[in-house]
Image (cartoon, rainbow, N blue to C red):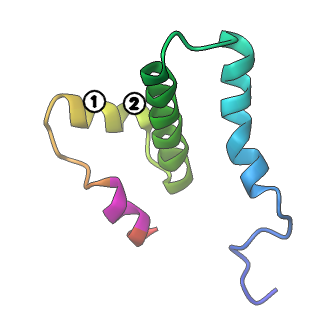
Amino acid sequence: MEFPTIPLHNNTSELAMREKVIQRKIRGYFRSLEGAMASDIFLGLMSTCRKIGISFGEYLKDRFYNRHELPPLGDLIWMA
């Protein structure tokens, strides 16, 4: 109980994989290795944004339109 931010269960990795499993069930397959890799990257970014409390859509807009109003995710992770 010294560290209340650490969950009392070890399901964190299972919960992180849930999104990937759901996507696999919906799509069934990918047409190419590049498509599978792109999906993994986007799901990873989405999960990271969710964990540090920022909007994935706002993060993507910030990067696509070169606004750079949000710091890099690596910097945000260290601040969280």
Q: Which mark is residue 61?
A: 1
Up the image or down, 52 lies above or below 33; here it is below
How many C-alpha atoms fall within 10 Å of the one at disc 2: few (<14), some, or many (≥20)?
Answer: few
Which image quadrant: the N terminus? bottom right
Residue pushed farthest front? Answer: 33
Q: Nearer the viewer, residue 20 or 51?
A: 20
Q: State the residue at coordinates (28%, 54%).
A: 72
Q: Indicate the quadrant where residue 56 lies.
A: top left
Up the image or down, 77 lies above or below 59; here it is below
As helix, strand or loop, the secondary structure at mark 2 comes to helix
Residue pushed farthest left? Answer: 66
Three-letter amino acid code of the residue under disc 1:
Lys
How many C-alpha atoms fall within 10 Å of the one at disc 1: few (<14), some, or many (≥20)?
Answer: few
Residue 41, x across and y down, in percent: 45, 36
Residue underneath mark 2? 57
Three-letter amino acid code of the residue under disc 2:
Gly
Q: Nearer the viewer, residue 75 or 54?
A: 75
Q: State the residue at coordinates (73%, 78%).
A: 4
Distance from the alpha carbon under mark 2 to that under mark 1:
6 Å
Q: Are marks 2 and 1 in contact (CB under 8 Å)?
A: yes
- Left or right for 44, reference 22: left
Residue pushed farthest bottom? Answer: 2
Residue 27, x across and y down, in percent: 65, 11
Q: Which residue range is magenta in the image?
A: 73-77
Count of labels shown?
Answer: 2
- Dominant secondary structure of the magenta stretch? helix
As helix, strand or loop, the secondary structure at mark 1 comes to helix
Residue 78, x across and y down, in percent: 40, 71
Q: Residue 39: say if magenta.
A: no
Q: State the residue at coordinates (66%, 21%).
A: 23
Residue 29, x across and y down, in percent: 64, 13
- Left or right for 68, reference 79: left
